[in-house]
Amino acid sequence: MLSSILYSNQSEAESLSDHTPVSNDSTLSISSPERTGKSVLNKMEVEAVVPDISNVSMPIKEPQSEYEIVDGVLKEELDYNSNIERYSNSEISPLGLIGSTDRRVRVTDTTTFPHRAITYLYVRWPNGEANRCTGFIINTNTVVTAGHCVYSHTKGGWATRITVRPGANGADNFPYGAFESTKLFSVKGFTENEVESNDYGAIKISGSFPASIGSFGYGVATESNFGGEFARVTGYPTDANKPLYTQWMHSGTIDLSILGFAFHDADTTGGQSGSPMYLKENNIARAIHTGDGKPKNVGVRITSGVFENLQLWANQ
């Protein structure tokens, strides 16, 4: 996660903000959003899709024999030159915990909605490094995440490969399987200028997610529908005291006082970049968690510009 957060100079954040979409696939034409009346509610909100699974067989736990596991980590990750720090000198990251104790709660059943629509991400970079992030599903082949989970200014640019595991619940429990990235998206404000209020992106996968997973809704965050609310942040932390591939959640008050940002006091740590920030009553994401810090943690607020790009990428 990003460690330095822009807390001040709102006018500078506005002037540098650039929501021009970009992709690792230079052949795509993504200069303007394409909206469909079917998927857009009130022009700036997409409803969460919660499928009726009463007549659907529950997903079968993938057999552990498909994966070689070493100390709770998939061997495919160990084989990759992943320069990942799991806070070996302390049980929990020093950043991200707002109080003196970790208040996050583990999601024990990740096959329930919306937890099955939250994904563990394993990201490989051109320089041979890797890291872990979180994402959330917005349609049958699109995952929203933080911009620094798809593009790195220090690791060679666009990620070379991202593995998506919806509803992961431990190293031997990937109930919906694994999906590989095809196309990646972000915006010029982040890839060219590293503007933190532009730190968002998306992943297109090969194939489609099972229809039984469903998808998060998403909409523009305003003071009337999100600011001051008690919202939830759910994702996959990498703290040494938490088993990898396990999902954790906590809720906190959202502050929209600075344009482009959603500050919050929910506990989060490394690996949770890309987590949805949402009201549990409607499962509509209104911000994307991007960084740990003091006195508050932060996410990219879904403004009209962010919303239009999510629409555009979902329709690619």
Image (cartoon, helix red, strand yellow):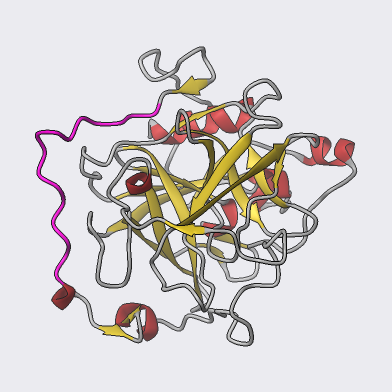
The rendered magenta stretch, by its main secondary structure, is classed as loop
Residue 100 sits above or below residue 111 on the image: below
In this rendering, position of residue 270 left or right of residue 292: left
In this rendering, position of residue 52 left or right of residue 300: left
- Give the x, y percent position of residue 89: 63, 87
Residue 114 counted in the magenta span:
no
Q: Nearer the viewer, residue 304 or 189?
A: 304
In this rendering, position of residue 204 left or right of residue 193: left
Residue 131 sits above or below residue 263 on the image: below
Write the start and end of the magenta stretch as one range.
48-63
The residue that appears at 38% across and 20% down in the rendered structure is 39
Residue 297 sits above or below residue 65 on the image: above
Task: Report the quarter where the C terminus lies.
Answer: top left
Residue 14 is drawn in which quadrant? top right
- Give the x, y percent position of residue 161: 39, 64
The residue that appears at 55% across and 48% down in the rendered structure is 233
- The answer, for residue 31, to whether it is visible in the render is no
- Give the x, y percent position of residue 306: 59, 33
- The answer, for residue 228, to whether it is visible in the render is yes
The residue that appears at 17% across and 64% down in the rendered structure is 62
- Give the x, y percent position of residue 74: 32, 78
Residue 62 counted in the magenta span:
yes
Residue 308 is drawn in which quadrant? top right
